[in-house]
Image (cartoon, helix red, strand yellow):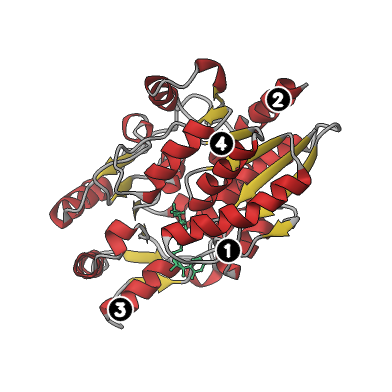
Amino acid sequence: MHILHVVGARPNFMKAAPVLRALREFSNVRQTLVHTGQHYDAGMSDVFFRQLDMPEPDLNLSVGSSSQAQQTAEVISRFEPVVLERKPDWVLVYGDVNSTVAAALVCSKLQISVAHVEAGLRSRDRTMPEEINRLVTDRLSDLLFTPSSDADDNLRQEGISPDKIHLVGNVMIDTLVRLLPQAKMPLELAGLDPFVLVTLHRPANVDDLPWLRQMLAALVEVSRDLHVLFPVHPRTSKRLAEAGVLPPENSKLRLLPPLPYLEFLALQSNARAVITDSGGMQEETSYLGVPCLTVRENTERPITLTEGTNMLVGRDIARLRTELQRVLTNPAARPCTIPLWDGHAAERIAKILVVTKS
Ligand code: UD1
């Protein structure tokens, strides 16, 4: 059996790594790894392949960055000949990035079976490009691997046949469970305690420059009481330069480059609290029991609100301040109890894939 994986952007890598690893156990499975090149910087891509112990991609489509439509179209036109030539039995797509939906579209038109890992998540906010990607990818997929039961409910409500849906758990947590013992604080940050970890990269937060300036001012204020570490995504870095804002030299707010997986995981697990708009970090902090304040009005991962440590603070600086104060003064760490977030989701996926085509 030939299984072809498509990855493109940073959050795909930690999801695909455990599935590639689990499928290696099956001697009748041959695997191909295609990188679309949506993320191309060494710090956004190469270092993740090394730390996650992923094989070199068999092919890199080098699509790079452009508008939503152009980036998606580039993946479509460059991926189609690959599928035609390699004729895989299954194509696996991950998460909700532009590369995911583009690859699913190619496969469905060529009648190649496609399986979506991390299916069924819904923010119900169609201003997010990721929500469009999720809806379309799930509609087109032949197998849908979900991380939590709310995702199954969403898919059933959309009329997707229940026999395509498999609740397998969270593959991103598989990677976290495997690599947490190796997570290490970057040397130059070791000993900084207490600290809050910040990441922001969603267009809704960082492309709105007046809002971005307000956020940065709020973080400078937080840094009067404790260290604030902010690894900056390339999109955010460009916007900060456009907005012309930098933290004052003497502040304890540190802007850092994007960090490799192991260093970033160490920061997450040692942080007093996390402020973010990332999807994956809502899950990782829930697993780690670290309070997470999400700077968004909605989430496609509601289970992290009800059974994890996540809280939506919206676009409200006053609320962010109050909630941060609350979690810092009253840290109520809870162990993660979300079913199937146990480090074995990828093994379940591998078994289902192998059985389905044999
Ligand atoms: C993408 C995903 C988002 C995911 C995020 C994680 C979509 C629609 N969005 O957003 O869901 O949470 O990745 O990082 O697919 N850039 C670089 N170097 C790189 C990659 C990007 O400089 O290696 C710059 C590009 O020039 C571009 C900006 O970052 O201007 C955005 O990149 P893009 O891949 O379009 O979207 P992300 O914001 O990274």
Relative image position of residue 295 (x, y in whole percent): 27, 52
Of the numbered discs 2 and 3, the one sitting upstream in the chain is 3
Task: Tell which tag, 4 or 1, sits nearer the viewer.
Answer: 1
Marks 3 and 4, how far apart in space?
36 Å
Identified at 78% across, 21% down, the residue is 358
The amino acid marked with disc number 1 is Val
Relative image position of residue 237 (x, y in whole percent): 39, 72
Residue bearing mark 1: 63
Marks 4 and 1, how far apart in space?
22 Å
- Residue 331, compared with residue 207, is above or below; it is above
Relative image position of residue 192 (x, y in whole percent): 42, 65
The quadrant in which residue 152 appears is: top left
The reply to whether discs 4 and 2 touch (Cβ–Cβ < 8 Å) is no
- Residue 182, compared with residue 117, is above or below; it is below
The quadrant in which residue 291 appears is: top left
Identified at 56% across, 36% down, the residue is 117
The reply to whether discs 4 and 1 touch (Cβ–Cβ < 8 Å) is no
Relative image position of residue 301 (x, y in whole percent): 38, 36
Marks 4 and 2, how far apart in space?
14 Å
Identified at 67% across, 44% down, the residue is 5
The amino acid marked with disc number 4 is Val
Residue bearing mark 2: 351
Residue bearing mark 4: 117
Residue bearing mark 3: 242
The amino acid marked with disc number 2 is Lys
> As drawn, is 104 to the left or to the right of 132?
right
Marks 1 and 3, how far apart in space?
25 Å
